[in-house]
Image (cartoon, helix red, strand yellow):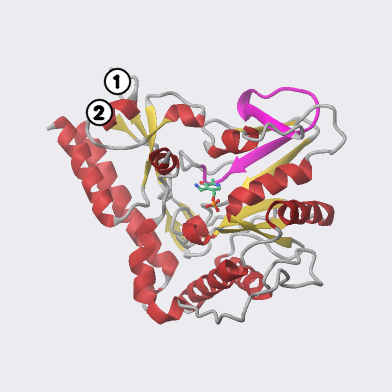
Amino acid sequence: MFSNFKCEHSGDPTMFEPFWRKMGDRSTIVIPGWQSMSYFSDIGNLCWFLEPDFAKEIRRLHKLVGNAITEDHYIVVGTGSTQLFQAVLYALSPPDATDPVDVVSAMPYYSSYPSVTDYLKSGLYRWGGDAHTYNKEGAYIEMVTSPNNPDGHARESVVNLGGGTRVYDLAYYWPQYTPITSNVDHDLMLFTVSKSTGHAGTRIGWALVKDKEIAKRMTKFIELNTIGVSKDSQLRAAKILRTISDSCEHMATSDHSECFFEYGRFLMARRWEQLRDAVRRSGMFSLPEFLPDFCKYAGVATTPHPAFAWLKCEGEVQDCESFLRSHKILTRSGMHFGADPKYVRVSMLDRNDTFKLFVERLLSINS
Ligand code: PMP
């Protein structure tokens, strides 16, 4: 059981640990025993369990990075964006519909969408498969993941039928992974500290929601599901976001390695360079190519360096996952993402030692 979970969630973003070690006390919080005892955080707010300090830091960070508009949006906090995904499905499904609403996403899609959508066999919604081929009448929900997990490409919605709602999963729309080309202003956007800062264990995500009624229904879902979201985690997340904003606010004048996004971008670029070099030398694999684009945040053109490598076994090998496993490399088969088993997803966010070992083993396959 445990190893299955580990394999499914091999995007554990532990590579950022050295940065947070370096931050030391600047990112530490102490919570006295008497604090955060109440269920409530902000009784007057639509999302009554949202810590005001966390909300403030979310708006500040988006403003600094310029990746998403927070004005005219309600913030709903969730136990990871996984809970928010479910809250969105609940909020968008008409309660009196005779058939469940289809949830679709363009292949290759994030492998949790089908399993999380269907595991409770809800009467409200169900997994509808690849958005490219979806052509049914009626209501549907399209998940648009940009940059995409697993292949790293920037995406737009692909279904063009009436009756649909688009939900933008922007977990990876941060400067360490991709150029920030526009300040997006979608009706429904999901973010998470898991990928933005690397704090997957804090289990905090947030949704930016334009429509008040949808924000209310999402809040209701979380109220029914977990009676709110850990205040301790929100306070920690607030401190983490504050540390990032503080470290990057004066980037022009300060040491660049002190800014989390610069540090992350540099590290991701180096890892991708190492991986591309190994793939080139092997002649057995291929990787997606990405063109540079102007990053409004960095003020220069940057190249995408996704959190996952969508690796393809070229030639005879049909089952890339098994082939790599026989060389002691654990990956996740393309099949989980609705794609061909010639593809696998490889995490680029593991600890340094593991990543080094991965590149060494990849290189040793051809030698
Ligand atoms: N969306 C995408 C696209 C992801 O890759 C992930 C994490 N793998 C999540 C959502 C879930 O994030 P969280 O840890 O906040 O539940």
**Which region of the structure is painted magenta?**
125-148
Looking at marks 2 and 1 on the same chain, the residue that comes earlier in the sequence is marked by: 2
Is residue 194 on the magenta stretch?
no
Amino acid type at image mark 1: Val
Q: Position of residue 46 (x, y in %)?
A: 80, 64
Q: Residues within 10 Å of mark 1 (few under 14, many from 20)?
A: some
Residue positioned 16% across, 31% down in the render: 366
**Residue annotated with mark 1:** 317
Q: Residue furthest left?
A: 367
Q: Position of residue 87 (x, y in %)?
A: 70, 48
The foreground one among 336 and 108 is 336
Residue positioned 42% across, 68% down in the render: 260
165 lies above or below 131: below
Secondary structure type for disc 1: loop
Mark 1 within 8 Å of ligand 1, using the beta carbon:
no
Nearer the camera: disc 2 or disc 1: 1
The foreground one among 91 and 249 is 91
Q: Position of residue 317 (x, y in %)?
A: 29, 20
Q: Position of residue 221 (x, y in %)?
A: 74, 51
Amino acid type at image mark 2: Met
328 lies above or below 15: above
* Marks 2/1: CA–CA distance: 9 Å
343 lies above or below 294: above
Left or right of 288? Residue 285 is: left
Q: Are marks 2 and 1 in contact (CB under 8 Å)?
A: yes
The foreground one among 142 and 276 is 142
Residue positioned 87% across, 35% down in the render: 96
| Residue 284 circle label | 2
Looking at the rendering, which quadrant does residue 138 occupy?
top right
- Residue 191 in view, yes or no: yes
228 lies above or below 60: above
Left or right of 314? Residue 125 is: right
